[in-house]
Amino acid sequence: MQTLIQNLKSFGKTELNTIIISVFLGLLVLSNLIIGNYFIIYIGALILSFIFIWQTPQAGFLSAILVTMIFGEHFSLLPIQINETIYKVYALDFVLIFTFLAWLFQQPIKKFSLKIFLSNKKNLWLIIFFIFIFINLLISIFFKNANTELALGTFKNYSYLLVYFLVIALFKNKQDIMRVIKTLFWTGILILGFVFYGIISGHGLWSEITPGVRYLSGLHSYYLTFSIIILLISLIYKKYIFNFFSDLTIFLLQIIGLIGGMFRHLWLGLATAFLTIFNFLSFKNKTKFINLSLTIILIIFLISLFFFWINGVIGNEYTFAHNNFFSSVLNRGQTLFEIGANTESATGWRLATWKIALNKFLSNPILGIGLGQRFYFEYRGFVDLIDIRNIHNDFASLLVQLGLLGFIPFILFNFYHLKDLLKSLKQKDNFLSLILLGFYIISIFGIFFAIYLMFNGTSIFYWTIMGLITVLINNKNNN
């Protein structure tokens, strides 16, 4: 654990180039937001970035993560535009491709053994999964009259699974894993700026695309979970990144930001991650976890008590119910317990679409209905046209589109990762396994309740997590 803390504070050529590349890419995004998408600026930023990606390919990947976490879809979905024509090849795609090419051309020439590659069950099932997606694409376009553009877009989104192999190629050992964790942690610190903005302004920056009062955008809420998990482990092990007070303050502020995002699946995912991590702690560390929880409860109680005392002194009859933030959180939390006709609209919409998806699946359970399919459905008096890939449950959308033949390889891919990860948790010095377990659990909640595989700004993190688990297990097996 002490090694992780040291790595979080270390700074070398890779970190420097990561920052430089991120600055170029960040300026590209800002120029697009302020003055528009200009080809010369786009290409210029990419060329400057590639110079430093070539020096350290790892920095290319780390900068892709960093800039995505800061700018979200404004970077990951930033297309290249030539005159008036927009091509759906995004800035994130270019950085990932450049990173792969920089790595590839710097590798010594050696014989590639497909047999050895496929002997790894995780590689095998992921390749089978990808093959089924490609076959399904061809069938959908040529035999099922699917929307070609939608089918190709769906295939492209699922193709981000190649990030898994890129991570394994770039990051070889525990120190490399810590370099990724370092990027996730420090970018989470930067996201605190968005948390403060949301609390002060009363709405999160770039949160308008999601209905309801939200003090932080959904993407920023998800990205915060990485540093929250890292800080939790550091607080439990008492190996502080700064000091106890600073770490705890940052931890609580990020928790407040996550809660203010109002995304219930992240609340549930983080709570499940905490409980699961607690389950795998030693008795000594479980005691530390409980003490930490009691300390946080005491701090919240004392702050609340002081808050009410100040209001009493100035003669202001003020309660938390009068505060927009707390009242919004309370109302949002109550929707978790609504059932039947009282079900909140977003939950009801999901349940309605999942029911239709089940019927679609039963119509062709083996091969699926294919990519690029849409369906009409009525919900509470409104008729809507929905892409089958966007039913806010990636597991269900995969099952419906690919059938059992395409869905089972994906499940087996996850099964073998989880099996290896749980096995590594039983070993000593398992703090990296605990961190990756927390990341994995939250991503699974996102996949089940949202479209974390269909959107590149979230899917690259899922495939990165899976890649890091493989790197960690490979290192432990080699040792």
Image (tube, grey):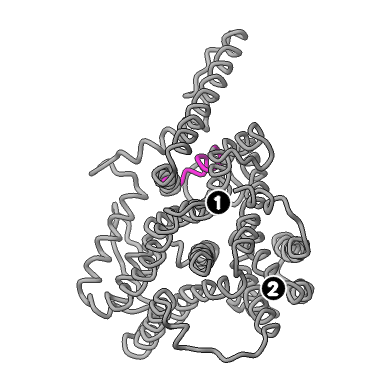
- Of 360 and 84, the residue lying toward us: 360
> Disc 2 or 1, which lies upstream in sequence?
2
Q: Which x, y percent locates residue 389?
A: 39, 69
Q: How many marks?
A: 2
Disc 2: which residue? 57
- Three-letter residue code for mark 1: Phe
- Of 407 and 455, the residue lying toward us: 407
Range of magenta residues: 256-264
Q: Is residue 448 visible?
A: yes
- Of 419 and 42, the residue lying toward us: 419
- Three-letter residue code for mark 2: Pro
Q: Which x, y percent locates residue 149?
A: 46, 80
Q: Which x, y percent locates residue 247?
A: 63, 38
Tell me: residue 297, above or below residue 177. Answer: above
Res. 226 mark: 1
Query: Which quadrant would residue 215 be assigned to in this image?
Result: top right
